[in-house]
Each structure stands twice: as structure tokens, then as C-alpha cells.
Image: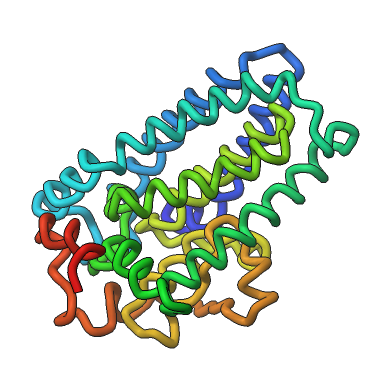
Amino acid sequence: MKRLITYTLYPVLLFSIFGLFYAAQTYGWDLKMTFAIMAGVRIVVLLATEFLFPAKKEWMISWGSFLRDLKYMMSGGAILGLLNLMGVWLAIDYSRFNTGIFQDVPVWLELVITILIYEFFQYWYHRYSHENLGPHGFWFWKVHAAHHLPDKVYLLMHPAGHPINFLITLFIVQAPLVLLESKPEVIFLFNALLGLQGLVSHFNVEIKVGFLNYILVGTELHRFHHSADPKEAKNYGVLTSFWDIAFGTFYYHPDLPARLGVFDEESYPRSNEFIKVMKMPFVK
């Protein structure tokens, strides 16, 4: 059963997005409700799978880590998640009146272009934050570092991070869709794919996707992004690995990282020291 999940769960989840999209188009389902129901069912399926078939038992959620994650959820993760859902709904409604530059472009091509544009800006913000580039780079790292303090990766640690970082990424996600005046169908597919990749990237289940690692960023690639070894902590893309490959920051290894977290952990507060973590961007 575990082997079956390793090789089939992700393709099923991926193709279910396009299957539900096709059904919504064929039967006139409301895209907003389809998106919300799909997102809810998906998280339940993934949580159950992670509980039953963890890739590494040491990375499983504990009461201590859950209580820690709950603080991050309440400070911004859950709230901004709801804001993102509302943003998707509003974007779908607003986009029905769009007359953007891609109105005569097929949905699939507009989706690819939108993903590449979004990921270009996300990639460089993410990389800038990690590599302390430029005069403000270290401040952005302190904003982003909260997400890298946990020493294990699982679904519910995904919201662990600083609310400023979530606000920035929320803007980067939705801004291209608004500025490009994307079609409702593109907004649905883009956010559905982004949501899936965000979840499976922090999934404590052994998932193998083969050549898809060179197209999409998922479980195998992103867990190395959380590696405490700077040589492994690459893969700045969150949806596609295109820009990582283009700019030489793609990293793949078939095994699991030896250790997760930050390299010089003594220089940072522990992930459960919530107040200290929230203060990080504002102290030297």
C-alpha cells in the first residue's frame, strides 16, 4: 500500500484538478465552490495519508509541535489562508469582466505564461531572502527564516512563518493574476496547482514523481530546500522548477535530508519561542 501511495497519490491529486475543472466546465459548476470543496477534501486526504504512512516517524507532528504551529496559524497562517481563498473567489468574480492581453490565448497557454511570470518574481524574492542579496536582503531573510526554524517537515507546519512573509507572498501570488487580467479558468487552475504544490512540498510521505521533478516543485525537491546543509538548501521555486534549472539552483537527491532547519541554529531563537521569532525582523 505504501509503495502504491508513493507512485500514484500525487498523479491522482494532480489530474483530479484538471478532471474537476473539466467537469465544472462541462456541467456548469460554480468555479468558486468547486475550488473550495476540492481544497477541503484534498487537505483531509493528505492529513490522513501522512498520519498512516509517514516517510520519517521523527518528522511526525507531536502535541508540542502542534501547539507551536497553532500559534503561527493564529498569528497569520490561517487568517492569510482564508484571505487567499477570498482573494481567489474575488479574482474569479472580477475576472469575468476582464479584457486582458491574453483573452484570445488558449487557457492552457495563458496558464503556462502566468505560472512562469509569477514564479520569476517569487523565485527572485525567495532567493533574495535566502542569499541575503543587496542592502535589504538580510532583513528579508529574518522575515522568511521563521519558516525554516522547524527541524521537521509535515503538512501542518506549512503555516509556520512570519505574517509579513505571508503578506508578501500573498501579494506576489495574486498580483500577476490581477495585472494580467487573467481568465476565471486560469485563476482557478493556477491557484489549485499552487495549493497542491504548497501542501505536497511539506508532506511527510514518501512521494516519487520521476521526470515531473524537472517541471513541478513538490515533495522530493522542497524538503531539501528545508535542509540545514547550505549545499542542499536550494530549489527556490514553489510551483515550477523551471527558474531553478535556468539559474542553476536546482537540487535533487533520491534520499531524505540528514537534518532540517537552519545551518547555524544557535544564532536563531527556537521555533517554539514564538515572541522572539516574531521580533526577528525588528531586532539587530
Q: How many marks?
A: 0
Q: How far from the left and from the top, in percent, is residue 242?
A: 68, 66
| 44, 95: nearer the viewer | 95
Give the residue furthest to the front: 135
Q: How far from the left and from the top, in percent, is residue 119?
A: 62, 58
205 left or right of 259?
right
| 208, 201: nearer the viewer | 201
Give the residue furthest to the bottom: 231
**Residue 6 visible to an observer of this rendering:** yes
Residue 81, quarter of the rendered image: top left
Depicted 26 relative to depicted 217: above or below: above
Depicted 275 relative to depicted 266: above or below: above
Residue 272, quarter of the rendered image: bottom left
**Residue 57 visible to an observer of this rendering:** no
| 269, 194: nearer the viewer | 269
**At 46% from the left edge and 26% from the top edge, which residue is drawn?**
86
155 left or right of 255?
left
**At 52% from the left edge and 51% from the top edge, which residue is drawn?**
197
Q: How far from the left and from the top, in percent, is residue 90?
A: 55, 23
**At 31% from the left edge and 34% from the top edge, which residue is drawn?**
79
156 left or right of 24?
left
71 left or right of 251?
left
Residue 42, quarter of the rendered image: top left
Give the residue furthest to the right: 104
Depicted 65 relative to depicted 227: above or below: above
**At 39% from the left edge and 55% from the top edge, which residue is drawn?**
203
